[in-house]
Image: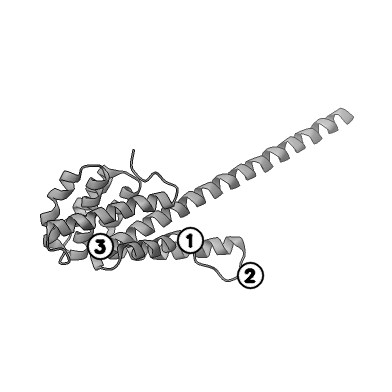
């Protein structure tokens, strides 16, 4: 009888240890995924700010910095709020900013941008080409810029330059191929810097 109680107690303790270990592992995994999500949100936000500046005008570097803050939801939240509530508020803020970016650039251009930040060049090109055919001139211009940057990021700069005439037709701020080249260079460098600032490889392997 005593042996049976001892065995039962041991089984209970083993189950407790297993359950606690499982909960810790799940918590660690969730925290890791949340961290990765925040990083990619900041990267997409920064890259989105950069593309928004190319489309709507403004300083590319400053727009990228603002986008990183929006995407990473690094803004302070008032005290007295639990960690879970704070995380939810940050997520809601990030979702709202990402939706605004999606609305500004259009669904296809936004998806192309996300793929570009992750070095998925073929996917990015597919979305960018679709966006470039949009009847919405801003969506079309965003798609054209993402297509140019994707080729350049993939070390196919001749293909990027071949798009300059179409880019000049769509972008009223650009009047020459040399100006298009300068903007492309600055944007490409900013894209690589954005990746580096978030501990990702600057260039795609």
136 or 176: nearer the viewer: 176
Residue ID for mark 3: 54
User: Rounded to the nearest whole Å, what is the CA distance between mark 1 and mark 2?
Assistant: 18 Å
Query: What is the x, y in percent for residue 29?
Result: 55, 44
Question: Given this view, does label 3 or label 1 mark the residue nearer the observer?
Answer: 3
Q: Earlier in the sequence, mark 2 or mark 3?
A: 3
SS at badge 3: helix
Crowd around label 3: few <14 · some 14–19 · many ≥20 (10 Å): many
Q: Name above or below for residue 121 compared with residue 85.
A: above
Total numbered badges shown on the rendered structure? 3
70 or 149: nearer the viewer: 149
User: Rounded to the nearest whole Å, what is the CA distance between mark 3 and mark 1?
Assistant: 27 Å
SS at badge 2: loop
Q: Residue at x 21, y 56 (%)?
A: 182
Q: Residue at x 45, y 52 (%)?
A: 39
Q: Quadrant of residue 187?
A: bottom left
User: Rounded to the nearest whole Å, what is the CA distance between mark 2 and mark 3?
Assistant: 40 Å
Asked if residue 95 lies left or right of residue 138, the reply is: right
Q: Earlier in the sequence, mark 1 or mark 2?
A: 2
* Cβ atoms at labels 3 and 1 below 8 Å apart: no
Query: What is the x, y in percent for residue 116?
Result: 31, 49
Crowd around label 2: few <14 · some 14–19 · many ≥20 (10 Å): few
SS at badge 1: helix
Residue ID for mark 1: 91
Q: Earlier in the sequence, mark 3 or mark 1?
A: 3
Q: Residue at x 24, y 64 (%)?
A: 55
Q: Name above or below for residue 38 compared with residue 1.
A: below
* Quadrant the N terminus occupies: top right
Residue ID for mark 2: 80
From where the camera sits, is residue 204 visible? yes
Query: What is the x, y in percent for residue 200?
Result: 42, 46
From where the camera sits, is residue 1 visible? no
């Amino acid at each position: 009888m005593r042996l049976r109680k001892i065995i039962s107690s041991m089984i209970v303790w083993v189950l407790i240890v297993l359950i606690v270990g499982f909960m810790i592992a799940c918590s660690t995994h969730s925290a890791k995924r949340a961290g990765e999500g925040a990083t990619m949100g900041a990267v997409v936000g920064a890259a989105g700010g950069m593309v928004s500046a190319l489309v709507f005008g403004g300083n590319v570097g400053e727009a990228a910095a603002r986008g990183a803050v929006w995407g990473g939801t690094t803004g302070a939240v008032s005290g007295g709020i639990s960690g879970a509530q704070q995380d939810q508020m940050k997520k809601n803020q990030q979702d709202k900013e990402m939706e605004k970016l999606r609305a500004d650039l259009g669904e296809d251009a936004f998806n192309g941008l996300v793929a570009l930040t992750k070095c998925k060049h073929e996917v990015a090109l597919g979305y960018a080409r679709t966006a470039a055919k949009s009847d919405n001139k801003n969506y079309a211009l965003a798609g054209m810029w993402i297509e140019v940057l994707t080729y350049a990021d993939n070390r196919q700069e001749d293909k990027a330059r071949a798009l300059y005439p179409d880019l000049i037709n769509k972008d009223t701020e650009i009047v020459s191929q040399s100006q298009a080249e300068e903007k492309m260079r600055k944007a490409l460098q900013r894209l690589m810097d954005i990746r580096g600032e978030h501990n990702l490889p600057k260039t795609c392997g």
